[in-house]
């Protein structure tokens, strides 16, 4: 249907002097004025009151119709159904009275939401006041009800017009916390109201209101000492009391609970920070359940109720089992015993769907006030601890609630292995939505197995999960430091066959976190020697870990053996060691191996004749810049002494977690083995904080060995500190080198032990040694000398061969210049790591036949792998600091990717993975990078690559972020692709290809594509779109057609492309517009792809500081 043209007045041109009459077209017929008053009144029923009042001034006929309509109207809405808005402004007392006098039959007045009302009239001043509104309402004799949200107005109506009902939901709009003193409301017993929602109001008491059905109290201060003494609302269906400032005496809440029991139709009960008497609900339920008390509850919420007991919650659940839908349980009640007791009750919950464990009210999560400030403002004095439910309890949860669909768990640190939640009686067969928040001890691999076993799971939401362990934890055997749990070596005894040498640290990273260590006082008491540069060990957790110290290489004089500079250039460790009481100096030590303990590497003895473990592949990290040694067993094993003890001398202690852990180097080709093994030196720095942990370490070591000697003992004595406050005195047989520069020395008896830094003595203090030009040959390394392990990182392995000589023959190294970028301090609580590490690799693998989407927020995973997710449609990742890579093995229809504020995301790798997916869907990728993007390189990667899509790169520069373009693109990108699909399938249009041959065929810009740029400004911020989308330019330039919709606020001035403004609502309609371009492409034989990809880059975070955004 063609658009109707406006009738124009035509004027015939006559001679200027002629007296010919002027001919005009006939006047358009006024159909509205020909309608009857009855028809016009019927039309007015569908118009907002504001538009009806405007018609009074258009014509006499319309004014008469408006007067007739107002005379008979019974229901008026001043907000036109938009209850959240305010009524039209401009009213004063006299005009409002005039309006209501025109409506004598008015019965219900909705939308009486004035933006501002004066409390009283002022003589000579025209205003909109409460007395004026009351006078106007009293002018309507048949008025039954009024809808309003004004506190003082509703109280005046209750007082002066008690017969008038308060319609709809009364909710005051000026609520706040702290509670404003001017917000006051007194509820009379005769109040005719069904829904009362009070936020930030001072209320003396809650009386007996017989009509009240829904009562919401949030931030309400109850001012009377006995605010519930008359509480009795028999019609109540919903009672919500959240963070109210009421009486602190628990006994004063007894009338509240008994009054709630009298409400036989009560369906929703939410108590947050209500200090009722513990055990009270149990007794009230026992007295009232036979008469129907609490029997119809479908929602039960307990949050921060200080005195609530398990029996209170349990009795409510049992009583309401028939209709219970949703249950939210505060942390103190989130424990195994609650669900074990429910299981013993042998009840059925046929309608139960939603369970929230460890529930904490959102106000407490978002409030920036301290606990003392909340108490000062009248809230109950409650401090919540994390829930103590374990895997056993969660397993019972599904045995009790077999139909559960939605599970949310918040801050339960004792959950470890989700795949243990599934048993023959607990299959979670209907679970659709899973949300885990701050459950830090959950193991990543177990979680992946759990997801694979859930048959109906569709949505996963993970928030603050799988935190990356603090730097150095993997080195010293600690799990992530939440303050709960113990070392991964103690909890997970998986090292019985020494398979921990294979570096599967990502399995151990999610073990229960270790307790916070003792104060690291030793680190500060050790005075560094003179002229030795000492750095602050450790890392800044967020941004400073990439800062690395650049140290110039040094050249050694003479032809003697050189110490690898890379291994020594990281940090200056001052370590001297003394013999422990149980290991006198000069006695030979057995071969040892190390096991990760709570505070360091524990040396373990091996019995004589026991074969040494195969040296593991040692992977270094790019930040530490250490050369790693790949040690292999020597072909001729050396004879070994009998095992003496579990070597953990206190002489090795320097400070908790201060383990240098330098890599052993690959030795030079071994000479024939000597008759006796040389003296061993314990170069490993390890300290255990308590006797209990030492005993646990010994147990873990003994269970992990292949063979255990019966004469093992633990040496835990500590040597007296040196007078100068430094480390223990040097052990006999170990001599520090000279002082000419910081050097890296290694034990002569332990050629592949960890290298440590030592203070270098001045030349005059040095004992005589062989000249540098004539070094002694290095002793042979034992066949099973231990290579200390490192956490698994992505960096490539670096190995080097170092000739080792006895320490007495070390040549004096030349001093080197150290250039430091930044001194770094360690923020972690578990360890002070002397070596900069790469991020701990944590891989989340997803395999689920029904999974639709996953949302990650503040998670510590580094890799996301989609193994087999045939229904997966979206991935959202926000503020995942170490998330780097995406691997898509099988997820054919995933089409939305959101990566916001993921600092270390490897954009090239992620984009390549997405674009290499088979083109079965159009895809949109939204990214908010936190660093500058090389747009030229990005365009080259996407447009030149072998990606069979039409591609668009949108650069958005709005700050604060505006999502208008992002949302609009999703509405029309499919239309562009649908046009191409229609042409290929039904019009035999050539389809483009993008194979490796095509990539080689077009090595230069525009790489065989028709690339163009669209630029504009949206809400004052520029945007730029580089794309090869076909049809788009023609569609943007086309004139609106007959299907154009002008109720849509966007056009090309406010967004990239507004199809509804042009009437381009479908592919068929668009093809009528672009016929000429279709012909041109067909003649030039330029094919099109069936699918499109949009990369939307929002640059508001590029300075590196994340911008607050409500949308994420």
Image: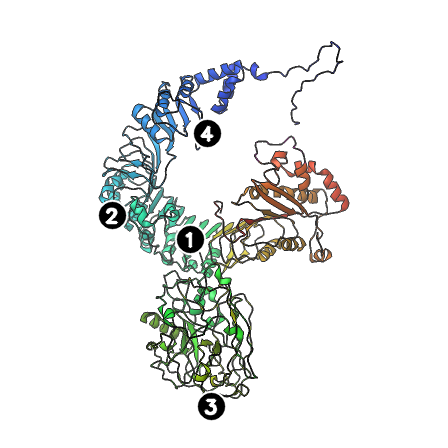
Q: What's the CA distance linking mark 3 and mark 1?
A: 60 Å
Q: Residue 279 carries which label?
A: 2
Quarter-of-image position of residue 273: top left
Q: Mark 1 points at which residue?
A: 437
Q: Given the current orientation, which residue lies at the most extreme top position?
A: 19
Q: In this view, does 665 lie above or below 988?
A: below
Q: Mark 4 points at which residue?
A: 81
Q: 10 Å neighbourhood of mark 2: few (<14), some, or many (≥20)?
A: some
Q: Are marks 2 and 4 in contact (CB under 8 Å)?
A: no
In the picture provided, is 753 more to the left or to the right than 1015? Answer: left
Q: Nearer the viewer, mark 3 or mark 2?
A: 3
Element assignment for label 1: strand
Q: In which quarter of the image is the N terminus?
A: top right
As for residue 855 lying within the magenta part, the answer is no
In the picture provided, is 1062 more to the left or to the right than 655? Answer: right
Q: What's the CA distance linking mark 1 and mark 4?
A: 38 Å
- Earlier sequence position, callout 4 versus callout 3: 4
Quarter-of-image position of residue 83: top left
- Earlier sequence position, callout 2 versus callout 4: 4
What range of the chain is rendered magenta? Answer: 1038-1049
């Amino acid at each position: 249907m063609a658009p109707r043209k406006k009738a124009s007045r035509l004027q015939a041109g006559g001679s200027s002097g002629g007296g010919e009459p002027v001919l005009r077209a006939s006047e358009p017929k006024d159909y509205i004025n020909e309608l009857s008053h009855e028809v016009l009144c019927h039309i007015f029923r569908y118009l907002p009151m504001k538009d009806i009042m405007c018609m009074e001034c258009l014509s006499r006929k319309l004014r008469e119709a408006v007067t007739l309509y107002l005379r008979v109207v019974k229901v008026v809405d001043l907000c036109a159904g938009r209850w959240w808005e305010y009524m039209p402004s401009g009213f004063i007392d006299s005009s409002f009275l005039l309006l209501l006098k025109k409506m004598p039959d008015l019965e219900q007045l909705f939308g009486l939401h004035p933006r501002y009302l004066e409390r009283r009239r002022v003589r000579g001043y025209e205003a909109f006041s409460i007395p004026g509104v009351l006078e106007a309402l009293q002018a309507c004799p048949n008025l039954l009800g009024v809808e309003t949200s004004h506190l003082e107005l509703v109280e005046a109506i209750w007082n002066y017009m008690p017969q008038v009902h308060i319609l709809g939901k009364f909710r005051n709009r000026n609520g706040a916390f702290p509670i404003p003193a001017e917000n006051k409301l007194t509820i009379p017993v005769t109040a005719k109201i069904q829904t009362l929602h009070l936020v930030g109001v001072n209320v003396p008491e809650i009386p007996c209101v017989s009509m009240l059905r829904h009562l919401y109290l949030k931030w309400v201060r109850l001012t009377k000492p006995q605010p519930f003494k008359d509480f009795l609302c028999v019609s109540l269906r919903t009672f919500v009391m959240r963070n109210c400032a009421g009486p602190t005496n628990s006994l004063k809440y007894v009338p509240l609970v008994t009054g709630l029991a009298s409400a036989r139709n009560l369906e929703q009960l939410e108590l947050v920070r209500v200090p009722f008497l513990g055990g009270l609900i149990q007794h009230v339920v026992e007295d009232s359940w036979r008469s129907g008390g609490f029997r119809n509850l479908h929602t039960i919420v307990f949050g921060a109720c200080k005195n609530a007991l398990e029996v209170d919650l349990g009795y409510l659940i049992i009583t309401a089992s028939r209709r219970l839908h949703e249950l939210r349980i505060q942390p103190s009640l989130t424990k195994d015993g609650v669900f074990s007791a429910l299981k013993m009750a042998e009840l059925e919950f046929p309608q139960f769907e939603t369970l929230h464990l460890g529930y904490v009210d959102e106000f407490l999560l978002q409030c920036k006030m301290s606990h003392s400030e909340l108490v000062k403002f009248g809230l109950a004095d409650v401090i919540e601890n994390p829930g103590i439910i374990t895997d056993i309890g969660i397993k019972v949860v599904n045995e009790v609630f077999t139909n559960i669909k939605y599970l949310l768990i918040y801050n339960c640190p004792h959950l470890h292995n989700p795949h243990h939640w599934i048993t023959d009686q607990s299959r979670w067969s209907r679970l659709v939505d899973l949300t885990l928040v701050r459950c830090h001890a959950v193991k990543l691999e177990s979680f992946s197995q759990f997801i694979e076993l859930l048959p109906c799971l569709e949505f996963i939401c993970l928030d603050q999960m799988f935190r990356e362990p603090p730097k150095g934890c993997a080195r010293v055997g600690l799990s992530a430091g939440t303050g709960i749990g113990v070392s991964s070596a103690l909890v997970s005894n998986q090292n019985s066959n020494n398979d921990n040498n294979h570096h599967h640290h990502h399995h151990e990273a999610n073990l229960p976190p270790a307790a916070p260590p003792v104060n690291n006082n030793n680190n500060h008491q050790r005075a560094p020697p003179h002229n030795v540069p000492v750095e602050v060990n450790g890392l800044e957790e967020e941004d400073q870990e990439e800062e690395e110290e650049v140290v110039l290489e040094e050249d050694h004089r003479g032809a003697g053996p050189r110490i690898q500079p890379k291994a020594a250039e990281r940090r200056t460790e001052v370590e001297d060691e003394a013999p422990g009481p149980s290991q006198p100096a000069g006695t030979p030590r057995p071969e040892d191996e190390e096991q990760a303990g709570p505070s360091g590497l524990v040396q373990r003895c091996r019995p004589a004749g026991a074969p040494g473990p195969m040296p593991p592949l040692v992977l270094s990290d790019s930040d530490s810049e250490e050369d790693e040694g790949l040690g292999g067993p020597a072909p001729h094993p050396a004879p070994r002494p009998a095992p003496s003890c579990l070597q953990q001398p206190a002489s090795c202690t320097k400070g908790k977690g201060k383990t240098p852990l330098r890599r052993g180097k690959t030795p030079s080709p071994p000479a024939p083995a000597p008759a006796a093994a040389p003296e061993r030196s314990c170069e490993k720095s390890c300290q255990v904080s308590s006797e209990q942990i030492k005993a646990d370490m010994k147990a873990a070591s003994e269970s992990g060995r292949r063979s255990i000697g019966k004469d093992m003992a633990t040496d835990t004595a500590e040597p007296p500190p040196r007078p100068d406050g430094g480390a223990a005195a040097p052990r006999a047989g170990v001599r520090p080198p000279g002082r000419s520069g910081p050097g890296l020395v290694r034990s002569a008896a332990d050629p592949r032990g960890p290298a440590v830094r030592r203070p270098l003595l001045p030349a005059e203090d040095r004992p005589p040694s062989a000249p540098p030009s004539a070094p002694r040959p290095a002793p042979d390394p034992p066949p099973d000398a231990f290579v200390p392990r490192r956490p698994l990182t992505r960096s490539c392995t670096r190995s080097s061969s170092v000739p080792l000589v006895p320490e007495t023959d070390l040549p004096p190294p030349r001093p080197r210049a150290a250039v430091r970028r930044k001194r770094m301090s360690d923020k972690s609580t578990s360890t002070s790591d002397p070596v900069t590490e790469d991020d701990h690799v944590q891989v989340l693998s997803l395999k689920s036949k029904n999974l639709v989407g996953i949302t990650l927020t503040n998670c510590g995973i580094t890799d996301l792998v989609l193994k087999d997710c045939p229904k997966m449609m979206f991935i959202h990742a926000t503020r995942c600091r170490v998330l780097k890579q995406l691997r898509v093995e099988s997820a054919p229809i995933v089409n939305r990717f959101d990566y916001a504020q993921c600092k270390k995301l490897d954009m090239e790798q992620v984009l390549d993975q997405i674009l290499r997916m088979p083109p079965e869907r159009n895809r949109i990728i939204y990214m908010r990078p936190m660093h500058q993007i090389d747009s030229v390189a990005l365009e080259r990667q996407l447009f030149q690559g072998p990606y069979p899509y039409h591609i668009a790169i949108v650069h958005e520069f709005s700050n604060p972020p505006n999502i208008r373009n992002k949302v609009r693109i999703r509405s029309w990108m499919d239309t562009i692709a649908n046009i191409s699909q229609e042409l290929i399938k039904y019009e035999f249009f050539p389809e483009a290809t993008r194979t490796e041959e095509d990539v080689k065929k077009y090595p230069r810009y525009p790489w065989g594509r028709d690339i163009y740029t669209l630029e504009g400004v949206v809400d004052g911020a520029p945007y730029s779109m580089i794309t090869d989308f076909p049809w788009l330019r023609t569609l943007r330039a086309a004139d609106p057609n007959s299907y154009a919709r002008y109720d849509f606020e966007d056009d090309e001035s406010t967004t990239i492309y507004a199809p509804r403004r042009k009437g381009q609502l479908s592919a068929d309609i668009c093809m009528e517009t672009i016929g000429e371009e279709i012909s041109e492409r067909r003649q030039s034989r330029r094919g099109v792809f069936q699918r499109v990809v949009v990369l939307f880059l929002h640059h508001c975070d590029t300075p590196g500081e994340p911008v607050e955004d409500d949308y994420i």
